[in-house]
Amino acid sequence: MTAGHYNFGYIDSDAYTGNITYVPVDDSQGYWGWTSSGYAIGSGGFTSKAIKGIVDTGTTLILLPSSVVSEYYGQISGAKYDKSEGGYVFDCGSHMLDFMYGVTDTASIRIPGKYFTYAPTDSVGKKCFGGLQSDGDFGFAIFGDVALKAAFVVFDAGRMRLGFASKSLS
């Protein structure tokens, strides 16, 4: 996986594939707020569900409603919520499913399953902490680095909108 980068003042058309889909920003709370149209897990069908959240480059994980997170980890063999770790853990060698979040009803971003193997929780690298965790039902989801590195994202402050496009993933 290559390191990410920021471009200021222009959009690099070589950095994404397809079209950029723009959505309005709700900045009433001081964040880059938006509403995802839903999600899909692995090869499963798309679930239409409005997920209000923010895009945040300062948050490492993707934090979604508990019901979505438990549905995802319910399909990962051996995954379980570990109270002492404060989130879902699984065997580091587990096959992780891709996850897709909807930008609109017609556009979505695929996060490769390997992005969810965030970090080992033990010194031997047997158990890993997941890159997808619950938002604690505190009122909004956070689309952090795990979600952002899977997409080409435009923060258009002039028009107060976010743009999402797919990109080549390694």
Image (cartoon, helix red, strand yellow):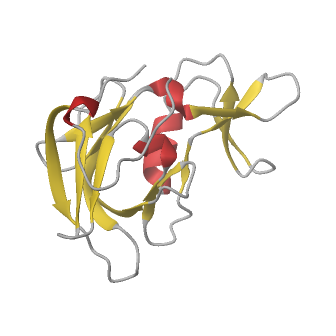
Depth check: give the residue in front, 66 or 164. Answer: 164
Query: Looking at the image, which residue sits at the far right?
Result: 123
Q: Position of residue 141 (x, y in %)?
A: 43, 61
Q: Give me the residue at 48% from left, 52% from top.
A: 144
Q: Is residue 48 visible?
A: no
| Residue 120 position by quadrant | top right
| Marker count (numbered) | 0
Position above or below: 118 against 69: above
Residue 13 image position (x, y, % from top left): 19, 35
- Corner quadrant of residue 15: top left
149 w.r.t. 144: above or below: above
Give the image location of residue 18, x and y in percent: 14, 31
Judge left or right: residue 51 versus residue 63. Answer: left
Question: Could you say which quadrant of the image residue 159 lies in?
Answer: bottom left
Give the residue furthest to the bottom.
28
Q: Position of residue 99 (x, y in %)?
A: 38, 34
**Which residue corresponds to the image point at 28% horizontal and 64% vertical from the top-left?**
34
Horizontally, residue 24 falls left or right of residue 122, namely: left
- Considering every residue shown, the one lying at the far front of the view is 9
Residue 162 can be seen, yes or no: yes
Residue under the point 31% across and 48% down: 153
Apparent side of residue 133 relative to residue 85 in the rendered image (left or right): left
Q: Quadrant of the C terminus?
A: top left
Of the pair 90 and 13, the residue shown nearer to us: 13
Relative side of 89 to 164, left or right: right
**On screen, residue 146 above or below 56:** above
